[in-house]
Amino acid sequence: MAAPGVVVELAPAKVNLCLHVTGRRPDGYHRLDTVVAFAELGDTVSGDTVSVEPAVDGIFLRVSSGLMPVGKGMTAPVVPAAVDNLVWRAAALWGREAGELRAVRLTVDKRLPAGAGLGGGSSDAAAALRALSRLTGRPLGARLRRNTVGLGADVPMCLEPRPWRARGIGERLQPVALGRDLPVVLVWPGRAVATPAVFRARSGGFGPAVPERVLEHLATDPLSALAELRNDLTGAACAVEPAIAEAIAAVGGLDGCRLARMSGSGSAVFGLFDDGAAATVAAAALQDRRPGWWVRAGVLRAAGIDTRLERRPV
Ligand code: C5P
């Protein structure tokens, strides 16, 4: 270790501003063309956090889900504190790539709903890798970055939480210029959906990629540009979980909402606003009406998110 201590990294929520399904690979994975951005939420700490500290021997993982929403009627999958947790697998990948398995204690504080299409697990895994890099003073090498797609299609984009266009299955990344920060309301209607089930429920062919003209338009008038794009998984996800359609309608009807859409394979829905104050008021009104939903106001940051929370000695 370069220096002992505890390194804490933020794992922000990922939002798919659009998600076009453009084809299918022979191995069954789908080819996508998606534009993502990352949210800074209104809470003091806006997203999951992952801490890493040195341990005497072996990898230890503690997941605190106390902060994850589990209200009445909500069905969130339990996040395992075991070898099938993406954070654990990220640490194992780090160990393999760094040439040895480090002895570390990892702690994940979950604040984002799981099974929501907000990239929680992927963002946690990416945060763990950034934290290990800071703790050990070793940079995240190009090969390690490439190999993170084996943890999950969304992990590479979460390594550096900034606006990206992602193609392939999500690993072919290209920076995207978002003209400005976008005030957002995130809504999770209290019920998780499993990504494979949504892809299985998809019917029909494949759509066109995101036109270059629209990508360029994102830099000048993001809301108008996004109105031309879509999430091709919406129909399938709503068939799997009808609460998603209800959430899209509810968010689209909020005062000041310019665009309402599902993120990823659902079940979370986002609404974009011109004005941050309007987003905050709308979120509070919706939370009042739907106490069983997880509702947050925040901002999608055009410049990306600073994820370095602290580094303190032990
Ligand atoms: O990579 P990740 O673990 O997030 O993917 C979960 C599942 O979602 C895959 O096993 C696959 O069924 C589906 N998927 C897909 N095409 C993608 C991403 C995910 O078919 N690009």
Image (tube, rainbow, N blue to C red):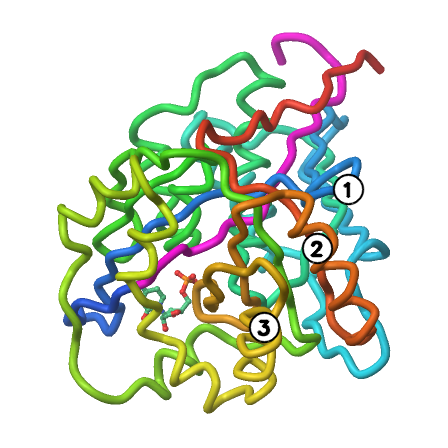
Is 173 positioned to the left or the right of 105 in the image?
A: left
Furthest residue to the front? 255
Q: Specify the quadrant of the image occupied by residue 163.
A: top left
* Front-most of residues 162 and 313: 162
Where is the C terminus found, in terms of image quarters? top right
Q: Which quadrant of the frame does ligand 1 lie within?
A: bottom left
Q: Name the amino acid type tagged 3.
A: Gly
Q: Name the amino acid type tagged 2.
A: Arg
Look at the numbered discs 2 and 1 and tell me whether their residues touch, using CB distance below 8 Å.
yes
Residue 195 visible in the current orientation: yes
Is 74 positioned to the left or the right of 66 in the image?
A: left
Chain part drawn in magenta: 1-19
Mark 3 or 2, which is nearer the eye? 3
Where is the N terminus found, in terms of image quarters? top right
**Residue with the mark numbered 2:** 296
Q: CA distance from mark 1 to mark 3?
A: 24 Å
* Front-most of residues 312 and 21: 21
Q: Residues within 10 Å of mark 2 (few under 14, many from 20)?
A: many
Seen at 78% across and 67% down, the residue is 287
Measuring from the top left, give residue 180's x and y in whole percent.
43, 34
| Between discs 2 and 1, the one toward the N terminus | 1
**Residue with the mark numbered 3:** 253
**Residue with the mark numbered 1:** 43
